[in-house]
Image: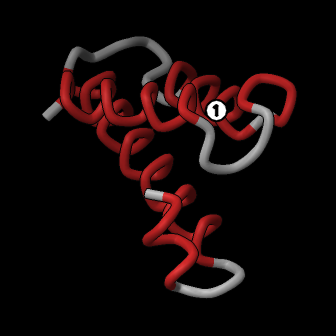
């Protein structure tokens, strides 16, 4: 993943990271809305904010962040 991000230039890693995090958050929101939760936006918002927090993931392109995103996309699609 990092190799493809570097091919896109200095903002490549950030673009790939943002697209994957947004995709996972939208799929999570869709699932929460499908199950008719009282606040379907709350859990996806917390997931996205924690994923983008520097103290949790320690920067862009870290293994923990990609693992969380890919597992959520796999489970929700």
Q: Quadrant of residue 67?
A: top left
Give the colour scheme of this rendering.
secondary structure
Q: Quadrant of residue 24?
A: top left
Q: Nearer the viewer, residue 46 or 75?
A: 75
Q: Nearer the viewer, residue 5 or 48?
A: 5
For the residue pair 5 and 39, the one nearer the viewer reads as: 5
- The quarter of the image holding the C terminus is top left
Residue identified by numbered label 1: 51
Location of residue 61 in the rendering, given as x and y in whole percent from the top left corner: 60, 48
Q: Which of 49 and 66 lies nearest the eye of the viewer?
A: 66
Q: Residue furthest right?
A: 55
Left or right placement of residue 67 versus residue 27 in this view: right
Residue 18 at x, y percent in the picture: 56, 59
Apparent side of residue 32 relative to residue 47 in the rendered image (left or right)? left
Would residue 48 be found to the left or right of residue 38 on screen?
Answer: right
Q: Residue at x 48, y 67 (%)?
A: 3
Residue at 43%, 12% (x, y): give it: 38
Measured along the vertical axis of the image, is residue 69 above or below residue 11?
above
Q: Is residue 26 above or below residue 17?
A: above
Name the residue at the left extreme. 77
Q: Residue at x 27, y 35 (%)?
A: 73
Quadrant where the N terminus sits is bottom left
Number of numbered tags placed on the structure image: 1
Q: Residues within 10 Å of mark 1 (few under 14, many from 20)?
A: many
Q: Secondary structure at mark 1?
A: helix
Position of residue 29 measured from the top left corner of the image (x, y, whole percent): 38, 34
Residue 49 is left or right of residue 48, and the answer is: right
Q: Position of residue 26 (x, y in %)?
A: 37, 44
């Amino acid at each position: 993943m990092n190799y493809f991000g570097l091919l896109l230039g200095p903002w490549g890693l950030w673009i790939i990271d943002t697209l994957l995090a947004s995709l996972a958050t939208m799929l999570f929101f869709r699932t929460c809305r499908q199950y008719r939760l009282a606040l379907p936006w709350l859990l996806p918002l917390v997931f996205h904010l924690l994923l983008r927090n520097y103290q949790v993931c320690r920067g862009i392109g870290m293994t923990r962040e990609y693992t969380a995103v890919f597992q959520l996309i796999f489970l929700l699609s």
